[in-house]
Image: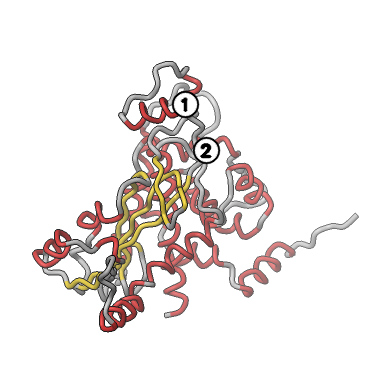
């Protein structure tokens, strides 16, 4: 029977470090204790009973959620990977003999964070950490939105009309109501229909770090949260966006707030763009395309972009974790290459 050597685990971890373990790098460059104050809020919620084992450390559980987001793992798969992979155990500070939270515990912790509304405060906590470590928003900002699909609801036309009016069908049982997402909406893009939500983000042009985000249902036009996303703290007054954001109202707003607009122009029927305007669009796209890199990396990290959650609160929390996980990943990469 094969028997492990005394230092086999240490040797294997050293080999993984030499190969470039991204989780080890993330563990080293981020002060994870900075999240404890926000996370401790959920431990102040009164428990139904004092019986049972002591709850897992909140920072440990938060790191578990981040690792699951970075590798697009469901709760059952995440539990297995923590038990199976040395890199996950090292990132979490667990040894082979330590208890590992099961899938149900991971789900409950995420749900607690959602109900406590902590996704945005945790995102903002890390944003403040970036500012204090020299990663100020520089060289202007880029605003854009990405569709996030959720499972399509099979409702009748009458039921959908009631939902749009803000009145979920009264005939639904409590069990059925819990399985219906009445917050998500339909929209069309490039002649294709989508059901779900939108992740509106503002990215700084230098570091490609998400500085702010807003989650809406998919029917909300990109431009409706434009003003809300703009970052006055950016060292440059330049703003890039695609043609969906161009309107007289927005141009006036940008001027009044002291921003320089670099918004793509769009031709109209019987009024195509001139060669000079087309060249201007190409010039703007060199900077504006950086926001597409962000969405591309998020899609690469998250795999399929569909989120299997019900209701805006849960979806917004998961989108918030995706945005935070991206920033953690990006921060680690920037430090590695600097």
Within-10-Å neighbours for mark 2: few <14, some 14–19, many 20+:
some
Name the residue located 34 percent from the left edge and 75 percent from the top edge. 285
Residue 72 in the image: above or below residue 338: above
Residue 81 is situated, as x and y percent measured from the top left of the image, at: 64, 51
Q: Give the percent coordinates (x, y) of residue 107.
A: 52, 38
For the residue pair 190 and 71, the one nearer the viewer reads as: 190
SS type, badge 1: helix
Query: In the drawing, what numbered circle is on residue 107?
Result: 2
Q: Residue at horizontal 65%, vertical 58%?
A: 86
Report, in whole angstroms, how far the alpha carbon at label 1 lies from the one at label 2: 16 Å
Q: Residues within 10 Å of mark 1 (few under 14, many from 20)?
A: few
| Count of number-bearing discs | 2
Could you tell me residue 201's position as x and y percent?
33, 58
Indicate the position of residue 276 as horizontal and vertical percent values.
Answer: 26, 83
Left or right, 311 with reference to 1: left
Which mark, by number, is residue 149? none
Q: Closest to the observer: 306 or 67?
A: 306
Q: Residue furthest right?
A: 1
Query: Closer to the N terminus: mark 1 or mark 2?
Result: 2
Mark closer to the observer (1, 2) = 1
Q: Please state if 331 lies on the left or on the right of 249 as rendered.
A: right
The front one of 230 and 91 is: 230
Query: Considering the numbered disc 2 on the image, is that residue within a helix, a strand or a loop?
Result: helix
Asked whether residue 141 is in view, the answer is: no
Q: To which residue does mark 1 refer? A: 178
């Amino acid at each position: 029977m094969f028997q492990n050597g005394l230092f086999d685990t240490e040797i294997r971890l050293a080999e993984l470090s030499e190969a470039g373990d991204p989780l080890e790098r993330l563990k080293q460059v981020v002060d994870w204790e900075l999240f404890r104050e926000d996370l401790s809020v959920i431990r102040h919620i009164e428990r139904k009973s004092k019986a049972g084992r002591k709850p897992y450390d909140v920072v440990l559980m938060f790191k578990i959620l981040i690792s699951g987001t970075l590798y697009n793992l469901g709760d059952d798969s995440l539990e297995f990977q923590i038990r199976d992979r040395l890199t996950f155990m090292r990132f979490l500070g667990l040894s082979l003999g330590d208890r590992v939270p099961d899938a149900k515990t991971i789900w409950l912790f995420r749900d607690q964070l959602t109900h406590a509304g902590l996704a945005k405060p945790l995102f903002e906590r890390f944003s403040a950490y970036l500012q204090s470590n020299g990663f100020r928003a520089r060289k202007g900002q880029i605003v854009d939105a990405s569709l996030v699909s959720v499972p399509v609801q099979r409702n009748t036309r009458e039921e959908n009309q009631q939902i749009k009016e803000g009145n979920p069908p009264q005939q639904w049982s409590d069990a059925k109501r819990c399985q219906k997402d009445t917050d998500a909406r339909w929209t069309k893009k490039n002649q294709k229909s989508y059901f779900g939500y939108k992740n509106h983000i503002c990215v700084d042009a230098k570091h490609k770090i998400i500085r702010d985000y807003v989650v809406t249902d998919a029917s909300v036009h990109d431009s409706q949260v434009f003003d809300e996303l703009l970052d006055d703290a950016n060292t440059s007054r330049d703003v890039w966006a695609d043609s969906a954001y161009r309107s007289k109202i927005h141009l006036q707003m940008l001027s009044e707030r002291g921003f320089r607009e670099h918004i793509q122009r769009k031709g109209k029927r019987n009024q195509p763009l001139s060669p000079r305007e087309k060249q201007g669009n190409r010039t703007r796209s060199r900077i504006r395309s950086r926001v597409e890199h962000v969405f591309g990396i998020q899609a690469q990290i998250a795999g399929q972009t569909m989120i299997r959650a019900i209701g805006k609160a849960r979806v917004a929390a998961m989108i918030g974790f995706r945005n935070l996980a991206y920033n953690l990943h990006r921060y680690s990469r920037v430090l590695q290459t600097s």
